[in-house]
Image (cartoon, grey):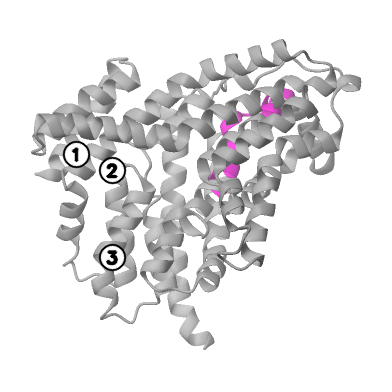
Amino acid sequence: MTLLIILLAVLALIVLISWGKVNAFLAFLLVTIPAGLALGLAPARVMAAVQQGLGDTLGSVALVVVLGAMLGKLVADSGAAQQIAATLIKAFGTRHIQWTLMVTGFIVGIPLFYNVGFLLMMPLIFSVVYQYRLPAVYVGLPMLAALSVLHGFLPPHPSPTALVVQFHADMGRTFLYGLLVAVPAIIIAGPLYTRTLKGIVSQPLATFVAEPVPTEALPGRVNSFVSSLLPVLVLGVVLGLRAALPPGGPLAPALNFLADPGVVMLLSLVVATFSLGTSLGKSRAAIMEAYAAAVRDVAPILLIIGGAGALKEVLVASGASSQIAAGLSHTGLPPLVLGWLIAGIIRVCLGSATVAGLTAAGIMLPTMAHSPANPNLMVLAIGAGSLLFSHFNDGGFWLFKEYFNLSIKDTLRSWSAMETIVSVVGLLGVLLLDWALPLLG
């Protein structure tokens, strides 16, 4: 019955948004409240879950989304994105731009959370798209595939890190095995799969589209790259210091504070306001107006992400995730496949990769106590499952759809299919490693 209610809720979302043309945030509320009641939650508990889901989701992403949008607007308006695009194209040519951006996403995705990396890379992607008249989805999806895979597979991202601890896996081995699985998954779901998506028409979010700046007025190459990628550089330095210094030392509180994505984004925006703003002759009033415009553009996206969070919280509060996982735990499947399947089904039903991964881990822990399965590979199997088929109840789905300004159909065909490919390829890679590691000794 639980699965039927969730399926009907997803179908209702599809009908309201695609056929009924209902605002996505309103559609989430219209679906979430009845779904919570049908799953047995008391009316007051349903509304409490809705408010908690909205608050928790927006609390975790709003600061980064808003500051990222401001930085992206400045990068676009100053000509920094134009300079970066010109430099990359000159170095690698348009023929290899997908691979160039994919490698950039891979490097950026190791230290950065997915949402942060997504927002940092949007100005770069859109600058390439508009300046060289290339298909947006074709150019951008390989980079986002890299960001997504690293978020789901590799420490130091939240879910993989937590799974390493729960399964008593080895952080270094998990990271190494994760790289071996991640690279083919990214290549297949990125540059190879997106060859089929060149026909998708996309007019990306206008806030990152700026009038071409004359070549002589562009900021310098070093300034453009450093200012645009400053959050990545700052976080990389901070994480490096945290790894090098003993935990609990006198600098630990300051480093933990500086590692917070919101703090990183705020510091980067302050620096960029000078390096790409006032130092290039822009007035503070003009810069602040650009920031206000960026906030106006991303406000609807925040509401949609909050709506997805509300639905997720109602499903979690109702015990749906535990019921689904318990129903799958006696299938007799190999442990690695079972971990992937449990995480995948919870992901499809609830939308959150992190919730899917952590819930699946809780179910698999008793099984692992009596299983010869490699704990490092179990972390990766569950991580791969947690990326399966992102759709209407996932904030990442709406980020991609709204920023690239796509139809529901084209978002499913591009984003959802890409996530499914990396999930399946990830499982196959884990099973291949499970077969090969004993042979290698």
Which of disc 3 and disc 2 is earlier in sequence? 3
At 61% from the left and 68% from the top, the residue drawn is 246
Q: Amino acid at mark 2?
A: Leu
* Left or right: 304, with 39 as reference point: right
Dividing the picture into quadrants, the one containing residue 124 is top right
Residue bearing mark 1: 6
Q: In this figure, which residue is indicated by the disc labeled 2?
A: 350
Q: Residue at x 65, y 28 (%)?
A: 71
Tell me the tag on residue 338: 3
Q: Does 200 sit above or below residue 366?
A: above
* Residue 192 percent location from the top left of the image: 57, 48
Q: CA distance from mark 2 to mark 1?
A: 9 Å
Residue contact between numbered discs 2 and 3, judged by CB atoms under 8 Å: no
Q: Dot 3 surroundings within 10 Å: few (below 14), some, or many (20 or more)?
A: many
Question: Would you say residue 128 sits in the magenta stretch?
Answer: yes
Secondary structure type for disc 2:
helix
Which stretch appears magenta? Answer: 126-146
Q: Quadrant of residue 209?
A: top right
Query: Is-magenta flag for residue 47?
Result: no
